[in-house]
Image (cartoon, grey):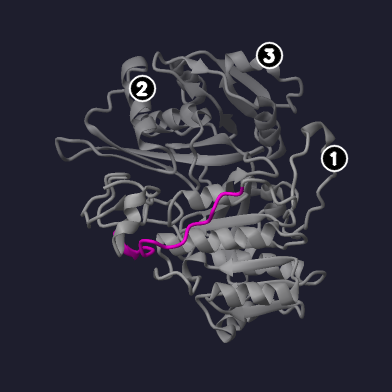
């Protein structure tokens, strides 16, 4: 057993490769030693022994030469503006010509819909080739008709053979190529099946060479994800591309988040927010107002927090429900926030604020199906639990911001000015925030800013 790259791998006719991490074994194993996933090793043919190897060059061919970095000229790279503001925001201003972009997401989340809408917005001025390996041309047309898409320069191709696809790209000379999905594309000279580790790696490498060729198009490839949420195939797939986008959201909620985890041509601190409808994905220009539109007033356990996703502050509703448990072991369930972080906050409330929660079930949720990871919502989660436990509604005109430490202290958070401005824009009257952040705010926007130093002080301010 070993990883790919040694001489012994080619000694047999088949090897067993992990679909998750690319680990290679000479025999089948139930559990991968590399990533410890079960039933992920699949059989894959290898080259016959004695196959010709590429010889090393003694001298360079002269086709390229090293250049001193000081002599390299910088020119502003023109971008292809998609026309969808949320997509352009995430990409850093649009698609870079010759770039390779990977779009991943759970099945049914809307990856193909987003890719088709991106192609539609570019098609009026540029040629776009949409390659579907999972649908026929008629099926793609049915989906396009449902979305109201009909552009003469949008070319549709149902093909899985990579050689045929590259030939059509060379003939059509499109500005954008969409591959939906990379798991269905195959190279006929490779003995492995489509979707295997070898096929995905080699096909992505060939598409990378097409994109990086002189005058090459931007290529958007759609990738499936595993049950753990990672792009299917070895991690080398994400290292090969220029940009990695994840399309996230709950299938039973209308909201979708487009998040960038890698971007060679822009920031990785941006997100795009969409709403799924019968006519496709619609941009959400004011997400805070949308997430708070159904917020109940004067309900115990409901607190408004301000989280920053990328460079955008979002006002979200955190809901908590505390009920006496009928069993000996209380339940703790969280949706939208990290469960381990919630357990830490419950311990702080028990120890530092005097809330006795040992005989109560605690349920915490972020309304709208949004997943929040930053610690600036700690104080809001803790106050929502206390509000439900004491059956006292929180002030509906107050926004809560702050990180909670193990000693019960409220720690400062970043980008406080943007959070205060977002609360003022939506008509809130007061913001409870860490006392250490008061000095960093110049424009209060007519809001009352209440600085707190510990969890007990915050509890007295919000619910008494």
| Residue 322 in which image quadrant | top left
Horizontal placement of 314 versus 441: left or right? Answer: left
| Residue 351 position by quadrant | top left
Q: Residue furthest bottom?
A: 138
| Mark in front: 3 vs 1 | 1
Which numbered disc, 3 or 1, marks the residue that appears first in the sequence? 1
Considering only order in the chain, which callout, 1 or 2, is on the residue closer to the N terminus?
Answer: 1
- In the rendered image, the residue lying farthest to the left is 328
Q: Badge 2 local density, few (<14 within 10 Å), some, or many (20+)?
A: many
User: For the residue labelled by badge 1, is the local secondary structure a helix, a strand or a loop?
Assistant: loop
Please rate how many residues cluster around mark 1, counting C-alpha atoms within 10 Å: few if below 14, some from 14 to 19, many from 20: few
Q: Counting residues from the N terminus, which is met first, the one under dot 2 or under dot 3?
A: 2
Q: Which residues are magenta?
A: 41-57
**Is 90 situated above or below 164?**
above
Q: Is residue 338 visible?
A: yes
- Name the residue at 48% across, 74% down: 188
The reply to whether dot 2 and dot 1 touch (C-beta < 8 Å) is no
Q: CA distance from mark 3 to mark 1?
A: 44 Å
- The mark closer to the camera, 2 or 3, is 3
Give the image location of residue 348, x and y in percent.
36, 20
Q: Position of residue 451 (x, y in %)?
A: 59, 16
Compute the Cα span from label 2 to label 1.
58 Å
Q: Secondary structure at mark 3?
A: helix
For disc 3, the marked residue is 439
Does the CB distance between marks 3 and 1 fall below 8 Å? Answer: no
Disc number lying in front (2 or 1): 1
User: In the image, residue 255 lies at what x, y percent?
Assistant: 55, 56
């Amino acid at each position: 057993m070993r990883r790919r790259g040694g001489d012994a791998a080619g000694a047999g006719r088949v090897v067993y490769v992990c679909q998750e991490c690319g680990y290679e074994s000479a025999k089948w194993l139930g559990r991968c030693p590399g990533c410890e996933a079960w039933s992920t090793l699949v059989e894959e043919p290898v080259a016959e022994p004695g196959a010709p190897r590429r010889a090393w060059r003694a001298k360079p061919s002269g086709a390229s030469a090293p250049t001193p970095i000081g002599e390299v000229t910088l020119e502003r790279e023109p971008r292809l503006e998609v026309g969808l503001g949320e997509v352009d925001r995430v990409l850093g201003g649009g698609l870079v010509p010759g770039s390779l972009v990977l779009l991943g997401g759970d099945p049914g989340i809307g990856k193909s819909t987003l890719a088709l809408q991106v192609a539609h917005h570019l098609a009026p001025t540029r040629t776009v080739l949409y390659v579907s390996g999972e649908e026929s041309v008629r099926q793609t047309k049915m989906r396009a008709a449902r979305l109201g898409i009909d552009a003469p320069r949008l070319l549709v191709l149902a093909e899985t053979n990579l050689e045929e696809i590259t030939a059509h790209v060379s003939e059509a000379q499109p500005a954008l190529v969409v591959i939906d999905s990379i798991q269905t594309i195959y190279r006929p000279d490779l003995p492995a099946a489509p979707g295997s580790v070898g096929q995905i790696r080699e096909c992505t490498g060939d598409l990378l060479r097409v994109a990086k060729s002189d005058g090459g198009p931007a290529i958007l490839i759609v990738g499936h994800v595993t049950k753990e949420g990672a792009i299917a195939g070895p991690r080398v797939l994400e290292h090969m591309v220029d940009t990695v986008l994840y399309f996230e959201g709950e299938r039973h909620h209308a909201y979708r988040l487009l998040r960038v985890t890698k971007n060679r041509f822009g920031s990785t601190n941006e997100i795009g927010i969409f709403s799924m409808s019968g006519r496709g994905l619609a941009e959400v220009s004011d997400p805070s107002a949308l997430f708070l539109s159904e917020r109940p007033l004067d309900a115990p356990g409901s607190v408004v927090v301000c989280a920053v996703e990328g460079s955008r502050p979002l006002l979200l509703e955190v809901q908590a429900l505390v009920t006496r448990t009928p069993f000996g072991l209380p339940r703790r369930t969280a949706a939208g926030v990290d469960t381990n972080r919630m357990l830490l906050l419950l311990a702080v409330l028990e120890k530092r604020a005097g809330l006795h929660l040992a005989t109560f079930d605690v349920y915490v949720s972020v309304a709208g199906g949004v997943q929040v990871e930053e610690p600036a919502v700690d104080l809001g989660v803790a106050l929502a639990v206390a509000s439900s436990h004491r059956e006292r509604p929180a002030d509906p005109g107050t926004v809560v911001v702050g990180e909670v430490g193990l000693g019960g202290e409220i720690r400062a958070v970043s980008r406080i000015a943007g959070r205060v401005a977002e609360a003022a824009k939506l008509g809130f009257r007061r913001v409870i925030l860490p006392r250490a952040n008061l000095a960093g705010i110049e424009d209060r926007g007519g809001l009352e800013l209440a600085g707190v130093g510990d969890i007990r002080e915050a509890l007295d301010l919000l619910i008494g």
